[in-house]
Image (spheres, grey):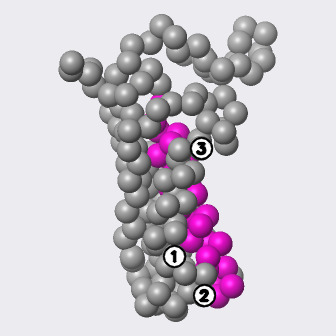
Amino acid sequence: MGLTHINKKGEAEMVDISSKKIVHREASASGKIYLKPETLELIRSDRIGKGDVLSVAKVAGISGGKMTSSLIPLSHNILINKIDITFNMESDGIGIVSRAVCDGRTGIEMEALTAVAISALTIYDMCKAVDKTMIISDIRLVEKRKSEIQY
């Protein structure tokens, strides 16, 4: 199978999905932001000067997932049923997991990945004044599923 976003002339193009069947699609993605223990404690105790880090990061991640087609040039604008983001406080950072759902002809994995990335970037932005060593890493697709829609 060749690259789907390249035409016969080698030019970038948006894939035509008009002949694809509408199916239920779900995707999960994960990532991690590594932080100093002191920064984690500031987040836990809600003492980061910019506000409630994880609440803001969750809203930012959901918003970012919804904006995927504006951020990634050849992706399709899809109707999203749900994006959810969870955070896991670990000893060396925060694990981030997103789950995105749609009923459509394509998509949802890029939205799940974007949600994780934007959540991590928001945490970074909110904590950069107190932690110059943060690392965003391990962003990946965990699972992608699709199933026929039952009417």
Callout 1: SS: helix
Reading the image, the residue beneath label 3 is 67
Q: Earlier in the sequence, mark 2 or mark 3?
A: 2
- In this rendering, position of residue 3 left or right of residue 107: right
Q: Amino acid at mark 2?
A: Gly
Sort mark 2 into few (<14), some (14-19) or many (20+) by Cα contacts within 10 Å: few
Q: Which mark is residue 53?
A: 1
Is residue 146 placed above or below 68 in the rendered structure? Answer: above
**149 to the left or right of 104:** left
Q: Tell me if I can see residue 136 in this picture.
A: no
Q: Is residue 44 above or below residue 143?
A: below
Tag on residue 49?
2
| Residue 45 percent coordinates (x, y) | 43, 90
Query: What's the CA distance linking mark 2 and mark 1?
Result: 9 Å
Q: For the residue labelled by badge 3, is the local secondary structure a helix, a strand or a loop?
A: loop
**Is residue 110 in the magenta section?**
yes
- Residue visible at 53% across and 47% down in the picture: 65
Q: Position of residue 7 (x, y in %)?
A: 71, 12
Task: Say which of 145 and 59 sits in front.
Answer: 59
Stretch in magenta: 107-131
Q: Are marks 3 and 1 in contact (CB under 8 Å)?
A: no
